């Protein structure tokens, strides 16, 4: 990976690139299950007056939030540019879910995020959301390829997901100059703000590749941090780890993609995380605690 300031990075650039493209070895070989989804929000109940149904939904951010003093502090880079983060400094058994691109727009995934209040950060690419050009080969064969476009992204936002930046066209950024990188990053930030009402503050460089110019361009596009990952989720909900012992660790950031069978794989993944005694954290709340 190109130069940059890292905090809690646990893998080399080569591994990050291989894993991000689905080429990593060491897939978790445990038995997968198709456990039924956990109950969603409470059903509406009749008011005493019989005036109609009122939905009783939980309030507040989805997922677990940090306890006082739980999260270690991520130091600010000395160059004043956005930090590059791949995990959160905590000893609590909590992990964070992120998903990239936007090709396979499965409504079943949105339903799980909404009804089970599962915190997710979605890093979207314009070409994927709008189904431009040639689709990512790993996303082809899906039933919902580009089906909802930006309306799908808004549905994810309304379900509680945060919508973040993953460039316009998914290029290898270090091959571009500063202006080219700024065009890619600022371009999709403007689209996200136009279509969702909120500009992103996190950026995930395609393939995990970046250099100092990437961080400079990201800052100039209003980005607070570059977010990488410590493990990827492959078809069937299998986890490809970037650590030798092949296990989840507190503070891990998991990377999924909008691929075929997303709703099924997401259900399997969430069940696996909980079986292993981990909670799913609210990334925004933990990042604020870590960069306070």
Image: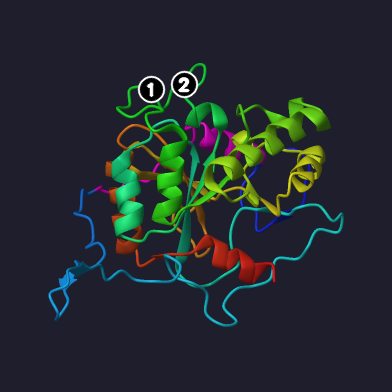
Instruction: Return the residue nearer the eye: 124 or 59.
Output: 59
For residue 203, say whether it is visible.
yes
Q: Quadrant of the N terminus?
A: top right
Q: Residues within 10 Å of mark 1 (few under 14, many from 20)?
A: some
Instruction: Return the residue nearer the eye: 111 or 28.
Output: 111
Q: Residue at x 53, y 72 (%)?
A: 91
Q: Is residue 63 magenta?
A: no
Q: Residue at x 70, y 66 (%)?
A: 74
Instruction: Return the residue nearer the eye: 50 or 270.
Output: 50
289 is higher (above) or lower (below) than 220: below
Count of number-bearing discs? 2
**Quadrant of residue 188 in the image?**
top right
For residue 244, say whether it is visible.
no
Secondary structure under the numbered disc 2 in the rendered image = loop
Q: At which x and y percent is residue 262?
A: 33, 39
Q: At which x and y percent is residue 291?
A: 69, 67
In the rendered structure, the answer to whether residue 29 lies left or right of residue 12 reads: left
| Circle number at residue 135 | 2
Q: Which region of the structure is painted magenta?
A: 13-32
* Tag 2 and tag 1, C-beta contact below 8 Å: yes
In the rendered structure, the answer to whether residue 90 lies left or right of residue 262 reads: right
Q: At which x and y percent is residue 209?
A: 67, 36
Q: Residues within 10 Å of mark 2 (few under 14, many from 20)?
A: some
Q: Is residue 27 magenta?
A: yes
Q: Residue furthest right?
A: 79
Q: What residue is pinned by disc 1?
A: 140
Q: Residue at x 42, y 53 (%)?
A: 158
Work out how far the residue at label 2 is from the one at label 1, CA to CA, in angstroms: 7 Å
């Amino acid at each position: 990976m190109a130069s940059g300031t890292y905090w809690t990075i646990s893998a080399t650039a080569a591994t990050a690139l291989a894993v991000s493209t689905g080429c990593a070895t060491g897939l978790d070989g445990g038995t997968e299950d198709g456990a039924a989804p956990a109950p969603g929000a409470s059903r509406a109940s009749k008011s005493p007056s019989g005036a109609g149904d009122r939905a009783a939904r939980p309030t507040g951010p989805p997922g677990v939030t940090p306890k006082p003093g739980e999260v270690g502090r991520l130091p600010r880079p000395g160059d004043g540019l956005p930090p590059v983060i791949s995990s959160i400094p905590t000893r609590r058994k909590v992990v964070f879910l992120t998903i990239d691109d936007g090709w396979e727009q499965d409504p079943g995934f949105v339903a799980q995020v909404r009804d089970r209040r599962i915190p997710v950060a979605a890093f979207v690419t314009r070409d994927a959301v709008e189904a431009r050009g040639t689709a990512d080969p790993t996303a082809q064969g899906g039933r919902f390829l580009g089906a909802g476009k930006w309306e799908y992204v808004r549905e994810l936002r309304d379900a509680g997901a945060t919508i973040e930046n993953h460039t316009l066209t998914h290029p290898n950024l270090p091959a571009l100059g500063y202006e080219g990188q700024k065009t890619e990053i600022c371009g999709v930030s403007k689209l996200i703000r136009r279509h969702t009402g909120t500009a992103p503050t996190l950026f995930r460089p395609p393939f995990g590749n970046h250099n100092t110019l990437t961080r400079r361009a990201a800052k100039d596009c209003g980005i607070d941090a570059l977010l990488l990952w410590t493990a990827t989720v492959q078809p069937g909900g299998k986890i490809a780890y970037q650590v030798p012992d092949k296990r989840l660790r507190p503070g891990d950031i998991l990377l999924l993609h909008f691929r075929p069978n997303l709703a099924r794989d997401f259900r399997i993944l969430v069940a696996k995380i909980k079986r292993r005694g981990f909670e799913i954290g609210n990334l925004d709340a933990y990042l604020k605690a870590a960069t306070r």
